[in-house]
Image (spheres, helix red, strand yellow):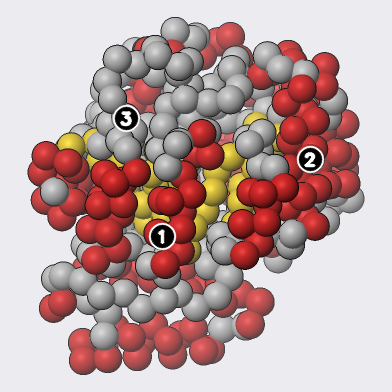
């Protein structure tokens, strides 16, 4: 199977939503629904899931409504991955994380406001003591659920429950092809066997599952074997992620300890292409790269280049809403302010976001796959540049080539 980038789009038509403010909702009266569904009907059947999501994203952004939400249920995890930018050991955070009643209350407000997609993550989302109550409540509200998990807590009972109440997809991170690599990455040899069991159980239970390969210095040499293992276990998509986030200060970790260099990332993507039998190209070949950097600038221009804060949000384990989990452009406590007031503040901040003049003057500005969150984490600011570090031309080129590679795979 091809190694594809996972798309956050539904596999079936989403449930209708109710909520305020009604004048901005998508309805036949204001022309939103007729336009949306006429475009959907004109698309190919195999493309309708992504077409539907893109149409909804456009409509929700226009109406300033929350389409997607990521809920970080807990900072605690069953593993101690050396490259994790956020993981906390039990007791490291003095503040109380949200309980099940609080999460359900927040999610109900979000659904009433229009939410259709909910991602549950952590830490390890299954680690939260009220996980199943939260999950079942979201299912009862007709929400599409994405579960981001390391798989170590998925046993026979969990697989059975997921079969009976399937999520949109389980996105399961796999860190190595054998116990020894798992120990090097996560600190646990036994974790490999738990993950292997989880993949087999989910496949037997026919639970839609994608595999996420998160690459770092600790498993770089295992890549070929890891990709072969993922292909042998996969019954969904395989997503290769080699671009790390800067760690949060409280994690006590250093980016340079685990992040791959540009050259190492290039070799990973080259090997991925070769192993999938595709035409190869050099990531440093100017004859290939320069045409990609020509043409019209991206529509986002100097504004927010993704959906963060425009139609999506993240709420952390202490109840703070941000555009995304790594970008504190605005951070508002939902328990204190209420969901909609928090959303309006986050949405206003995202709509007001502008990249710096220095960034806009860059020759690569129009085709740069710019991520404000990565630069904010690197610099501790939100002005669109990675602090005192100069923008890395090779990293920008890499992102451009990765996007082109993904387009070729999906053709």
Mark 1: secondary structure: helix
Q: Can residue 237 be seen in this snapshot?
A: no
Residue beneath the point at 46% across and 53% down: 135
Which residue occupies the extreme front position in the image? 157
Left or right of 369 on screen, residue 114: left
Label 2 neighbourhood size at 10 Å, few (<14), some (14-19), many (20+)?
some
- Mark pair 3, 2: CA separation: 30 Å
Find residue 70 and report its horizontal and vertical position in percent: 39, 47
- Mark pair 1, 3: CA separation: 19 Å
Q: Can residue 92 be seen in this snapshot?
A: yes
Q: Please give the label number shown on residue 138.
A: 1
> Label 3, on which residue?
97
142 versus 222 height, above or below: below
Find residue 129 and report its horizontal and vertical position in percent: 45, 37
Left or right of 380 on screen, residue 158: right
Q: Please give the label number shown on residue 220.
A: none
> Label 2, on which residue?
197
Where does the C terminus fall, quadrant-wise?
bottom right
Q: Earlier in the sequence, mark 1 or mark 2?
A: 1
Left or right of 48 on screen, residue 151: right
Label 3 neighbourhood size at 10 Å, few (<14), some (14-19), many (20+)?
some
Find residue 109 and report its horizontal and vertical position in percent: 22, 58
Mark 2: secondary structure: helix
- Mark pair 1, 2: CA separation: 26 Å
Where does the N terminus fall, quadrant-wise?
bottom right
Residue beneath the point at 49% across and 10% down: 253
């Amino acid at each position: 199977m091809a190694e594809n980038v996972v798309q956050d789009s539904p596999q079936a038509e989403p449930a209708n939503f109710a909520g305020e403010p009604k004048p901005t909702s998508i309805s036949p009266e204001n022309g939103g629904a007729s336009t949306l569904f006429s475009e959907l009907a004109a698309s190919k059947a195999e493309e309708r899931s992504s077409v539907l999501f893109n149409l909804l994203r456009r409509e929700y952004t226009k109406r300033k409504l929350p389409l997607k939400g990521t809920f970080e249920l807990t900072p605690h995890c069953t593993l101690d991955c050396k490259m994790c930018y956020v993981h906390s050991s039990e007791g490291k955070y003095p503040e109380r994380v949200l309980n099940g009643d609080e999460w359900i209350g927040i999610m109900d407000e979000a659904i009433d406001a229009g939410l259709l997609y909910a991602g549950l993550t952590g830490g390890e989302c299954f680690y939260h003591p009220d996980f199943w109550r939260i999950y079942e409540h979201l299912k009862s509200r007709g929400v599409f659920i994405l579960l981001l998990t390391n798989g170590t807590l998925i046993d026979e009972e969990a697989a059975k429950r997921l079969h009976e109440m399937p999520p949109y997809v389980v996105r399961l991170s796999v860190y190595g092809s054998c116990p020894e690599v798992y120990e090097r990455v996560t600190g646990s040899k036994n974790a490999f066997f738990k993950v292997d069991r989880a993949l087999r159980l989910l496949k037997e239970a026919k639970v839609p599952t994608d595999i996420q390969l998160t690459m770092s210095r600790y498993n770089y040499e295992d890549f070929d074997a890891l990709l072969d293992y993922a292909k042998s276990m996969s019954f969904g998509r395989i997503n290769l992620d080699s671009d790390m986030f800067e760690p949060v200060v409280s994690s006590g970790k250093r980016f340079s300890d685990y992040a791959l260099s540009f050259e190492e990332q290039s070799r990973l993507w080259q090997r991925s292409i070769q192993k999938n039998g595709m035409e190869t190209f050099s990531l440093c070949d100017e004859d290939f790269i320069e045409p990609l950097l020509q043409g019209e600038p991206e529509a986002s221009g100097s504004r927010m280049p993704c959906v963060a804060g425009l139609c999506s949000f993240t709420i952390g384990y202490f109840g703070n809403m941000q555009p995304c989990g790594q970008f504190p452009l605005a951070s508002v406590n939902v328990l204190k302010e209420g969901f909609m007031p928090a959303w309006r503040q986050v949405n206003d901040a995202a709509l007001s976001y502008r990249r710096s003049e220095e960034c806009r003057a860059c020759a690569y500005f129009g085709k740069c796959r710019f991520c404000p969150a990565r630069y904010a984490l690197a610099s501790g600011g939100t002005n669109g540049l990675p602090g005192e570090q100069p923008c890395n031309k090779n990293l920008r080129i890499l992102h451009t080539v990765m996007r082109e590679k993904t387009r070729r795979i999906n053709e």
